[in-house]
Amino acid sequence: MKQTQLNLREPAVVPARVHVSPTVGRWRRFLLPAGWGQVACWLLLVGGVWLADTRWSWSDDTPPAAPAVAESPAEQPVAVTSTAPSANPVATIDVARIFAGGVPTTLDELRAMEERQRKIAEQAQRCTVSIRVGNAQGSGVIVSRDGYVLTAAHVAARPNVNAKVVLSDGREVAAKTLGMNRTVDAGMVKINSIKVDGREVRWPYVPVGLSTDLKPGQWCLATGHPNGYLSDRAPVVRVGRILLNDPSVIRSDCKLVGGDSGGPLFDMEGNVIGIHSRIGRSLSENMHVPVNAFLNEWERLVQGEDWGNLPGVRPGIGVEGVEGASDAKIGKVISGRAADKAGIQVGDVILQFDGQEVENFGQLQRLVARSQTGKTVKVVVRRGEEQLTLDLVVENLNRGAPEE
Amino acid sequence: MTASSLRRVVLGACIWAVGLSMAAGLPAQTAPPSAPSNNAADGSTLRNAARFFQRMMPRTQATHERNHTSVMAAFGDTVEKPSRSTVRVYCDGEQVALGAVVAADGFVVTKASELHGLVECALPDGRRLPAEFIGQHRETDLGMLKLDASDLTPLEWAAGEPPVVGSWLISPGSSGPVAIGVLGAAPRQVKAPFGLLGVQLQDGPQGPLVTAVVPESAAQEAGLKVNDIITHINGLQMKSQSELQATVRKHMPGDRIQVAILREEKRQLMSAVLGGFERLNERQFEQNNRLGGPELSKRKAGFPSAIQHDSVLHPYQCGGPVVGLDGKAVGLNIAHCDRVSCLALPVAVIIPVLDELKSGQLRPGPSVAEQQLVLATRADELRRKIDAWTKKVTQLQANLEESSAAEAAAVKAAEQAEADEQAKQAAEQARQTKSDLERAFQEAKQALDQATSELKMVESKVTLQGE
């Protein structure tokens, strides 16, 4: 498989787009409210007794103990070559063919697979981190020596807030959340840079691959902190196979559970190909954000942009229009909902929504559908002779789905 | 907690529906072996029905899944040898676990907490033998079974450290692998949450006094009431509430403990199944961990050391060996603990307890102290019974005397008036009453004698002091 090494400081080398970013419509097909039975669960851990014990200081003027990883071999991303040591009789086995979607048939092939699994597991564990944002915890993976971390949007939660990253060896370092594409659940975090003796501390990291050409049957390896971080347990390794590859989601049978959110999925060359997001009803429904979703929007994520809504979220404000009206006149305001809370009344005509001119109710609907839940927007309304500007917080019509 | 973090709590607890487009491949589920013919326990009917429907459901097992039979087949050679040392353990006719032969002369080690009732082992050669549960080790949850056999093949243990993360781990069944997986986390202690009884206490002269019972707690289920005095837990005398708390906390949620109380000066024994703390998001947690996979083991924590692997095992497939590619056992599967993993005890914690388990020193069942309490409670009960019977016997004796006198009078009256039918009838009735009373008196006396002799026997066994 083609391997791409990224210098994450220079987005110019980000590979050309291979897939157009998924549209909301694509998600809808998967995630609109449906009959019960098919259930997806986010993998974030929030609150809980054990978190109360492990609060940390946000203070930036107390830098964490200097990490001593500068000279560590993992400073270089280690791509695993497909040739086993020549002294080993296993060397003749074409393990790449198996990992690309084949099935092992002999003990020697299993041994060759095992050798690779162990090697990748070790690197994967070293670069997998626990991420704490507020009272929530998830996982993440360091993908550059200067500390860029890929995670899930629902772990990072909000851009540009303080976070804590716990490295696989237990060291805790301060970090900041960057941008997030909620549409696919992609989030980014950056470990705050630390200088020791005038030199920037370097972090152990793994290379990022491409999720473009993943085939069903291809083998993969997952790490993360299932059921939450434990100080006496390194990131937990699982091995499985790709079952579906779509521009907006990868499905595998690497089993995931709460706390794994944001953790990495690797191909058997040791490249990150996905980020854990959520699970479904069966053990073979483990969903990952394809890594291309990060690569395609790298600069926006680095800049801290926050766009889209998480899969399953439906933004709404709780109003109905007046049938046949040529303008966006409000015929009904649902009590207790966003518009009601903002002070919108029956008979008001919406003139502007979040800085955009509104000509009719249909246009208002489209603007709301594109807005982000939880975000405060300015709404300009005409009430009789008056023109008022109201603050409105867009809400999620899909109760039970995440808001942020 | 801020409003936003509250919202995040909601976020963590969210579940919502997904469209049907996800081609749902049900997890590879090996159909559980059918119950042996001798007796299918009534209690298992529902479970059997559930399994039946599971098997009837269309199974679109994707050929690309790791656990597909095409992949599993590659491990056939690996498990060939350890399979000969793997047995299926049945309790009351239903498979509850796998087990590993640890000595040729009939010793099989398995998961203790799954055992109950009549135990049998199905050997790889097709024999099915009755087994005696001779040893239980609480810390590791290992149980020792003894079979009447001398020709079994003992399991071969791997020497040295457990394999490294990323290594294949294979769980053999009696024929072929039941599951494959990869070692995901090195050996570590798996702590257990502590059990809760659910009472508020206050120290009293006779022991901790119950001042409140938490609704829906273990205490309420067991029947504990306010003003009960808890005197013993599992036969150990409780002098203070702190002692009681410390004793209860040594147990895990789900453990059954024996609680001895004094209620209105009377000793009573109760059995309580301990509860646990519900974490803020415990339900979501549990739901997440049960999503799509087999049931979780009842006992899934509290192990001195365990390795974690990503095999998919049913609780009734735990207790057996887990091997590396060389076919040597690196441990015993001890629990299916969450959605992503099973736990296995490494060789290093198994070997040191095997001899003790075989010796018979760790026989399952109530401890001596618990047995003593049962006897002492029975003695108290018998003494109360004897009191009651004694009173009844005295009363009946008085009644009988009265009745005898009445009968004599009635007979005399009937003799005097020979032709008087009424007098005859009265005499007959008096005789009847007297014989009824006589019978009741004899019965009461017999019951009293029985209780007295049982008490004598019980008292001879009670060695409990200071009661």
Image (spheres, rainbow, N blue to C red):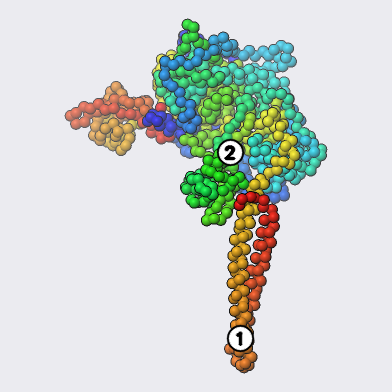
Q: Residues within 10 Å of mark 2 (few under 14, many from 20)?
A: few
Q: Looking at the picture, how far across and down is residue B326, in whole percent?
A: 73, 25
Residue nearest the observer in this picture, A318 or B351: B351
Task: Give the mark nearer the N terminus: 2 vs 1.
Answer: 2
Q: Chain of mark 2?
A: B
B61 with respect to A339 (left or right) = right
Q: Residue at x 62, y 80 (%)?
A: B404
Q: Is residue B265 visible?
A: yes
Q: Element under label 2? A: loop
Cα–Cα span, label 2 and label 1 = 72 Å
Residue pictured at 70% horizontal, 21% vertical: A111
Label 1: state its secondary structure.
helix
Residue with the mark numbered 1: B409
- Between circles 2 and 1, the one closer to the viewer is 1
Chain letter of mark 1 equals B
Find residue A320 and report its horizontal and vertical position in percent. Answer: 30, 35
Residue type marked 2 = Lys
Which of the numbered marks, if any, corresponds to residue B250?
Answer: 2
* Mark 1 closeness class: few <14, some 14–19, many ≥20 residues within 10 Å: few
Relative to A149, say whether B93 is above or below: below
- In the image, residue B190 above or below residue B388: above
The residue under the point 67% across, 19% down is A115
Pick the quarter of the image with the N terminus of chain A. top right
Q: Is residue B84 visible?
A: no
Q: Position of residue B295 (x, y in %)?
A: 59, 38
**Quadrant housing the C terminus of chain A:** top left
Three-letter code, disc 1: Ala
Seen from the viewer's position, the closer of residues B93 and B237 is: B237
Q: Residue at point 69% right, 12% down?
A: A85
